[in-house]
């Protein structure tokens, strides 16, 4: 049997669809030919990944319950005294570890979603303010007017007093006109 023929028959062989007459020569070729044997082994390993398994049903409200318990500080671990090193116990420990990870992920998602919701509004407002050219122009204009007013006030102060008070936060009394 040629390698090309063997390769084309391997999938059917792995699925058990070949007759004895077809499977016999292929089996003989796989015994003799290392590359084809490797290919058959790869196909076998691949098949294992896609083997049908029992569908796993997640009970209603499972994620919410897990998240709630995780938020209450439940790590899913038994006290050390109860942790007997038995195979069944190991399996339970593994399951609890997976549950803890799931709970942590669920809790994290929950917190993140809360955070996102709180951040969403101010964030978009800020974006609007930053990206609005009219608003920034108005703010610049306001700053300019304020500066002009301060300058005028200081000029008035200078005119009244020989020793002018520095800064715009000078008490109002000193700014009174005579
Ligand atoms: Zn071959």
Image (cartoon, rainbow, N blue to C red):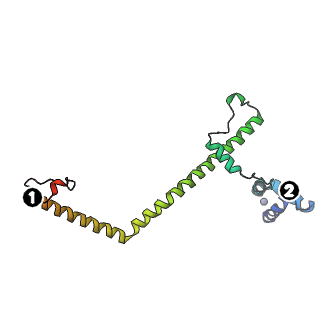
Q: Nearer the viewer, residue 118 or 43?
A: 118
Q: Nearer the viewer, mark 2 or mark 1?
A: 1
The residue to which callout 2 is attached is 28
Disc on the earlier residue, 2 or 1: 2
Identify the secondary structure beneath mark 2.
helix
Looking at this view, name the residue that lies furthest to the bottom.
134
Looking at this view, name the residue that lies furthest to the right.
20
Q: Position of residue 49 (x, y in %)?
A: 75, 54
Position of 25 compared to 56: left or right? right
Question: Which residue is found at the position 17% from the left and 62% from the top?
Answer: 151
Q: Position of residue 28 (x, y in %)?
A: 86, 56
Identify the secondary structure beneath mark 1.
helix
Question: Which residue is found at the position 74% from the left and 39% from the top?
Answer: 92
Quarter of image, ligand 1:
bottom right
Position of 171 compared to 41: left or right? left
Badge 1 crowding class, 10 Å Cα cut-off, few under 14, some 14 to 19, many 20 or more, is some
Q: Marks 2 and 1, Cα distance to the nearest angstrom?
A: 115 Å
Q: Quadrant of the N terminus?
A: bottom right
Q: What is the number of the mark on residue 160? A: 1
Q: Are marks 2 and 1 in contact (CB under 8 Å)?
A: no
Position of 122 compared to 113: left or right? left
Looking at this view, name the residue that lies furthest to the left.
162
Position of 149 compared to 23: left or right? left
Q: Position of residue 96 (x, y in %)?
A: 70, 41
Q: Nearer the viewer, residue 96 or 116?
A: 116
Q: Nearer the viewer, residue 18 or 59?
A: 59
Q: Quadrant of the C terminus?
A: bottom left
Quadrant for residue 27, please give it.
Answer: bottom right
Question: Which residue is found at the position 28% from the left and 69% from the top?
Answer: 141
């Amino acid at each position: 049997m040629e390698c090309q023929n063997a390769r084309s028959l391997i999938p059917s062989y792995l699925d058990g669809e070949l007759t004895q007459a077809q499977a016999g020569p292929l089996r003989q070729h796989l015994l003799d030919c290392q590359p084809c044997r490797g290919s058959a082994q790869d196909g076998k390993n691949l098949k294992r990944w896609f083997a049908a398994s029992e569908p796993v049903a997640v009970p209603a409200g499972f994620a919410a319950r897990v998240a709630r318990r995780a938020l209450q500080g439940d790590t899913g671990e038994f006290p050390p005294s109860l942790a007997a090193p038995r195979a069944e116990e190991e399996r339970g420990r593994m399951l609890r570890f997976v549950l803890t990870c799931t709970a942590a992920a669920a809790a994290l998602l929950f917190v993140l979603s809360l955070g996102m919701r709180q951040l969403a509004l101010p964030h978009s407002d800020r974006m609007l303010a930053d990206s609005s050219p009219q608003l920034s122009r108005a703010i610049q204009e306001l700053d300019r007017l304020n500066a002009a007013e301060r300058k005028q006030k200081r000029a008035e102060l200078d005119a009244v007093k020989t020793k002018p008070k520095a800064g715009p936060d000078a008490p109002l009394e000193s700014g009174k006109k005579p």
